[in-house]
Amino acid sequence: MKNTKMWTLITAVMAILTVIGGFLALGEEGEAGIHATLGIVTLISALISAFVASRQ
């Protein structure tokens, strides 16, 4: 887990997906559970990225 660039890229991609999902949810009255899930995954990915960066 020494590849900080990979984790940073994963975090960036998940953040972009979360933002896109949030915009898509604005016009829908349905369930927004997937957007909450993406937000949680993004947070976890960011925490992992910060942890890996601090260990180097």
Image (cartoon, grey):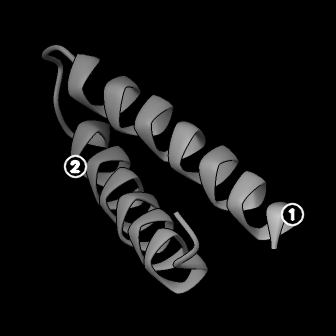
Task: Give the labeled residue for mark 1.
Answer: 54
21 sits to left or right of 49: left
With respect to residue 5, does 41 lie above or below?
A: above
Q: Nearer the viewer, residue 25 or 49?
A: 49
Q: What residue type is labelled 1?
A: Ser
Query: Residue 24 — which label?
Result: 2
With respect to residue 44, does 29 lie above or below?
A: above
**Sequence order check: which comes first, mark 1 or mark 2?**
2
46 sits to left or right of 55: left
Q: Is mark 1 on a helix, strand or loop?
A: helix
With respect to residue 36, does 43 lie above or below?
A: below
Where residue 35 appears, x then y in whole percent? 31, 33
Q: Which amino acid does label 2 sit on?
A: Leu
The answer to which image quadrant residue 31 occupies is top left
The answer to which image quadrant residue 55 occupies is bottom right
Where residue 50 appears, x then y in whole percent? 76, 58
